[in-house]
Amino acid sequence: MRAFTVLTSKVMPLDRPNVDTDAIIPKQYLKSIRRTGFGPFLFDDWRYLDPGTLEVDPATRRPNPDFVLNDPKHAGAQILIARENFGCGSSREHAVWALDDYGFRAVIAPSFADIFFSNCFKNGLLPVVLKADEVQAIFEGVASDPGKQFTIDLPAQELRLPCGKAFKFEINPHHKHNMVNGLDEIGLTLQQADVIRAYEARRAQQAPWLFN
């Protein structure tokens, strides 16, 4: 998993509350169990004017010119901002995979659905919870100048605005440690590799029949 320390980027504004996981990555794309390749289908129903499946090349479909992902002003943004209850709906981990595969490293919202919130940390996507008025200030800043660069400093736990103002955010210390050090659950387990090997060696001596 990629480490997350400090990110400076434009912000893509998705001015909608209650964005559910079916909107983030629709059900027809859940047949794939790979963690990559979902970016072209992110927000699929809003992003394209034509229906799609895994078998349809997204390049052949008509983009919706009114949807924010298709607005060239926001191209290259690695931070997504939305309204409350982002990631509600089903528990599909594909939603986080799609956001990450598109290129987002962080999502800012006043609140997140619990399972989506947890899935973000397992996959290196930073969910930042800010107050509603702070989120509104960011939306207004992006609207006035879409090219503005915002900085998320995870070690300092703050979002810095182009004007110099900063908003503090809370994060579980365990999640912060894992994100800063790029540790997913496999990485955490591998940190105990010596302990695991020692246990297996003891068990092989105590119950050799289990290892035949």
Image: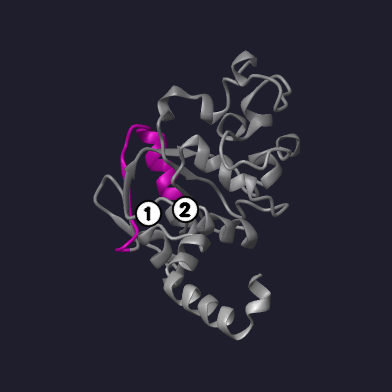
User: Which residue is at 73% across, 26% downward?
Assistant: 53
Does dot 2 land on a helix, a strand or a loop? loop
As for residue 177 lying within the magenta part, the answer is no
User: Which residue is at 44% across, 46% downward?
Assistant: 105
Q: Are marks 2 and 1 in contact (CB under 8 Å)?
A: yes
Observer-nearest of 166 and 6: 6
- The quarter in which the C terminus is drawn is bottom right
Position in image of residue 154 (x %, y %): 34, 59
The residue that disc 2 covers is 124
Q: Is residue 44 left or right of residue 172?
A: right
User: Which residue is at 44% across, 23% downward?
Assistant: 72
State the CA–CA distance, disc 2 to disc 1.
Answer: 7 Å
Observer-nearest of 151 and 135: 151
Residue kind at label 1, given as amino acid type = Ala
Q: Is residue 104 left or right of residue 29?
A: left
Instruction: Spot the residue most to the bottom.
Output: 206
User: Which residue is at 72% across, 40% downward?
Assistant: 30
Does dot 1 land on a helix, a strand or a loop? loop
Above or below, 119 against 189 in this view is above
Q: Earlier in the sequence, mark 2 or mark 1?
A: 1
Position in image of residue 55 (x %, y %): 71, 23
The residue that disc 1 covers is 3
Residue kind at label 2, given as amino acid type = Gly
Q: How is the image coloured?
A: one colour
Position in image of residue 205 (x %, y %): 56, 83
Above or below, 187 against 30 in this view is below
- Specify the segment rendered in magenta: 135-156
Q: Is residue 15 visible?
A: no
Mark 1, other Cα within 10 Å: few <14 / some 14–19 / many ≥20: some
Above or below, 99 against 194 in this view is above
